[in-house]
Image: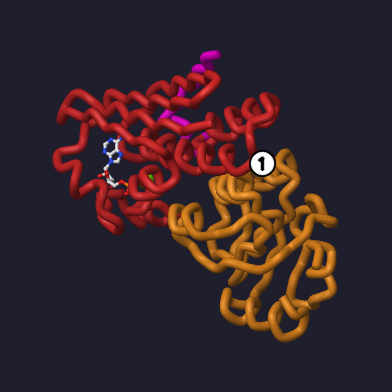
């Protein structure tokens, strides 16, 4: 089963909508509550990053018997130094984003921590595609 | 303890009623959303000075039944609507985060 969500960076107040919607899909599918929580947290962090660091994009969630895969693709600025971006506490969030409580530099570490597998493909000037996998 | 029990505290005012019968097992205090995302636990009351709509998404995804907005900050219309949809209770207080946490611990045994 495949579920697709558009993430609109022009409407930051809607950020988190895709994660919340996919969460209810997973509930309806009867997925284990602990796994739902992990997926929701990790997907939310990715979704927010697409809004505050890129210009939105598309999220594709694939559910099969053994695993759930969440692919988040944007055509934003890309990440120049991925190791740095993965470091807890490192952030380039704008002052505006920080005032809303973003910018702790914990989003990427959270995605790593709450997923079973995390893969990032990124190119400066082209965009970032983040893949998260969760075992069922 | 359930969310309803919080209403007995004079310093807390009800901004939006969610599920008042939801169980509360403890608390978490923080204003950086992704730190709260990583560390808060299901069933905890969350004390923060953030008041914009993203706090509802964080609470909902984490299973936090009640958000206490401290220091007199007021949520906007979007936050109220979103909390209503998610069944999350919003409480407000003029006290700072530490002081309201202290009251919840000392007076309500949270
Ligand atoms: N999709 C993206 N496009 C471009 N840069 C990104 C993207 N995602 C993350 N980054 C970069 O990686 C850094 C670290 O991301 P991370 O999510 O860990 O922290 P943050 O978003 O800055 O703060 P927080 O998530 O704690 O609110 C960001 O500050 C940004 O520089
Ligand atoms: Mg982030």
Q: Residue A33: x and y, percent?
A: 64, 40
Q: Report the residue at 32% width, 54% height from top.
A: A105
Query: How many numbered callouts?
Result: 1
Q: Residue furthest bottom?
A: B106
Q: Secondary structure at mark 1?
A: helix
**Above or below A122: residue A110:** below
Split into 4 quadrants, where in the image is the C terminus of chain A?
A: top right
Q: Is residue A100 visible?
A: no
Chain identifier matching the red colour in the rendered picture: A
Q: Residue at x 46, y 36 (%)?
A: A43
Judge the density around disc 1: few (<14), some (14-19), many (≥20) Cα neighbours within 10 Å: some
Q: Residue lying farthest top?
A: A1
- Asked if residue A44 is positioned above or below residue A6 in the image, the reply reads below
Estimate the x, y position of residue B9 in percent, counting from the top left.
Answer: 79, 76
The residue sitting at 41% across, 21% down in the picture is A58
Magenta residues (range) = A1-14
Residue A60 colored in magenta in the image = no
Say left or right for A5 vs A53.
Answer: right
Q: Quadrant of residue A95?
A: bottom left
Instruction: Spot the orange chain and give its letter.
Output: B
The vertical placement of B58 against A130, above or below, is below
Q: In the depicted view, which residue is nearer to us: A66 or B22? A: A66
In the rendering, at what x and y percent does residue B90 appear? 71, 57
Please tell me whether residue A98 is drawn above or below residue A8 in the rendered image.
below
Q: In this image, A54 relative to B38: left or right?
A: left
Residue A54, quarter of the rendered image: top left
Q: Which residue is mark 1?
A: B82
């Amino acid at each position: 089963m495949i579920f697709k969500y558009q993430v609109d960076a022009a409407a930051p107040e809607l950020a988190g909508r895709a994660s919340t919607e996919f969460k209810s899909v997973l509930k309806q599918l009867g997925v284990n509550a602990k796994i739902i929580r992990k997926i929701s947290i990790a997907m939310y962090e990715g979704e927010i990053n697409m809004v505050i660091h890129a210009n939105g994009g598309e999220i594709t969630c694939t559910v099969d018997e053994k695993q759930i895969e969440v692919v988040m693709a944007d055509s934003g600025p890309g990440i120049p130094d991925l190791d740095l971006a993965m470091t807890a506490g490192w952030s380039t969030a704008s002052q505006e984003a920080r005032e809303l409580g973003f910018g702790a530099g914990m989003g990427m570490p959270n995605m790593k921590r709450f997923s079973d597998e995390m893969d990032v493909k990124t190119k400066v000037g082209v965009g970032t595609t983040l893949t998260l996998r969760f075992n069922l | 303890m359930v969310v309803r029990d919080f209403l007995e505290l004079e310093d807390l005012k009800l901004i939006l009623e969610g599920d008042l019968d939801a169980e509360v097992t403890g608390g978490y205090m923080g204003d950086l959303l992704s730190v709260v995302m990583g560390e808060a636990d299901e069933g905890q009351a969350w004390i923060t000075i953030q008041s914009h709509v993203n706090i509802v998404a964080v609470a909902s995804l984490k299973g936090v039944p009640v958000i206490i907005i401290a220091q007199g900050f007021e949520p906007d219309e979007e936050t109220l609507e979103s909390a209503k949809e998610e069944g999350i209770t919003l409480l407000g207080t003029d006290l700072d985060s530490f002081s309201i946490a202290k009251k919840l611990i000392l007076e309500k045994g949270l």
